[in-house]
Amino acid sequence: MKIEAIEEKELKALYDTRLREDFPPDELRPFASMEYLLKSGMYRCFACREGGKTAAYALFILAEGAALLDYFAVDASLRGQGIGSRFLSALKSVSAEFSVPYVLIEVESLESAQTPEQALERRRRLGFYQNCGCLLTEVYSLLFGVEYQILLLPLRNAIAPGPEEVKASLEALYRVFVTPLTNGDEASYQKVCRCFLRPDRSEKSKNFARELGRSLTFLYRNRSKFMGERLRQYGFSGAMYMMLLHVDRHPGATQDSIATHMYIDKSNVARRIKQLEELGYIRRETDRSDRRQNNLYLTEQGKELIPLIRTYLSQWGQSVASDLTEEEQDTLLRLLAKIRKG
């Protein structure tokens, strides 16, 4: 892939067509700002061609030993063909044009995502840049109310800079284009622009995953043991009492619906349901609309056990949460529901 530098005249044509199509108006800086930076030697613009048209382009701001990716887009008709990845990788071939060892890239942070959809899109974008050889840094910025995580694309074979150096470079780059927008007023600048460090959370994330898994496993096994000891005299084992409760809440449920609801293998459900039927707690009725299916209902003997099962479950819940206040219990349930939903 051949990358070519773009001069002012072509940049203006690109701005009036492609940039206006590829970016919403509130994300597009005035062309006068680009023109000023270009004439000041602080702007670099590159494009690659495919079939006689601009397949992709990237615009960069330069200042004090680093470059910041300002705008980057691939032609809509050519997306999904790996052009963006090849373009960023090929930047190393024109690194002499930059006179800097690395490029900084802003990606809206995962921490500030408001919805699962936003988080998914941001993870996809982070993954794209990482696949292109970009490195995650501990540097973040808050720019005009939007929080970004900063990635670093090395252009030369040099030791990657530390977070403090990256932060200093980013602040210098922001000074180039944010200061004119605030008319040089320092107080205004500080309100709209801030760079900060957020230490790598990978180890913390690992600890969280490990401790969460251990806690959930302990609670599951503790409840299984508690309920197993109290229901053994009734012939129960494993998740049989949970299946009985499900049928109580959903009369006419099928074995398939129980397997789906409880995330249990269908063969395991079939085996447990057969045991419950043999113990006299459940009866089957052929589904009138689909004779291949059986609907499950509690017998009178099964119904009599439901209050006892719920009493034991309540006792177990009170036991494991005995050190929590009612408010803490409510918070715990709310957070677990949030995790389950996510």
Image: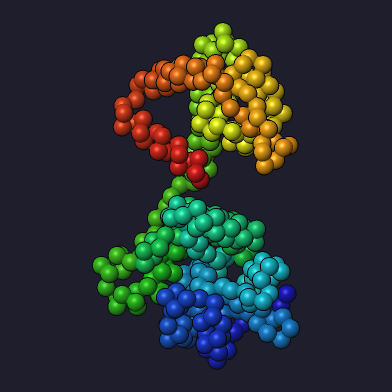
Compared across the picture, whether 84 is left or right of 59 comes to right
Q: Residue at x 72, y 37 (%)?
A: 291
For the image, the number of numbered tags is 0
Compared across the picture, whether 173 is left or right of 11 comes to left
Return the x and y of residue 68 as percentages of the image width and height: 50, 69
Compared to residue 280, the image places residue 126 above or below, namely below
Compared to residue 147, the image places residue 8 above or below, namely below
Return the x and y of residue 26 as percentages of the image width and height: 42, 75
Find the residue positioned furthest to the top: 233
Indicate how the structure is coloured in the image. Answer: rainbow
Q: Quadrant of the N terminus?
A: bottom right
Residue 273 or residue 232, whichever sits in front: 273
Return the x and y of residue 20 as percentages of the image width and height: 51, 82
Residue 131 or residue 269, whichever sits in front: 269
Q: Which quadrant of the structure image shows residue 57?
A: bottom right
Return the x and y of residue 144 as percentages of the image width and height: 36, 67
Residue 149 or residue 240, whichever sits in front: 240
Residue 267 or residue 210, whichever sits in front: 267
Compared to residue 49, the image places residue 293 above or below, namely above
Q: Residue at x 59, y 15 (%)?
A: 236
The reply to whether residue 44 is in sight is no
Find the residue positioned furthest to the bottom: 9
The reply to whether residue 283 is in sight is yes
Q: Which quadrant of the structure image shows residue 73?
A: bottom right
Q: Residue at x 39, y 23 (%)?
A: 321
Q: Residue at x 55, y 32 (%)?
A: 251
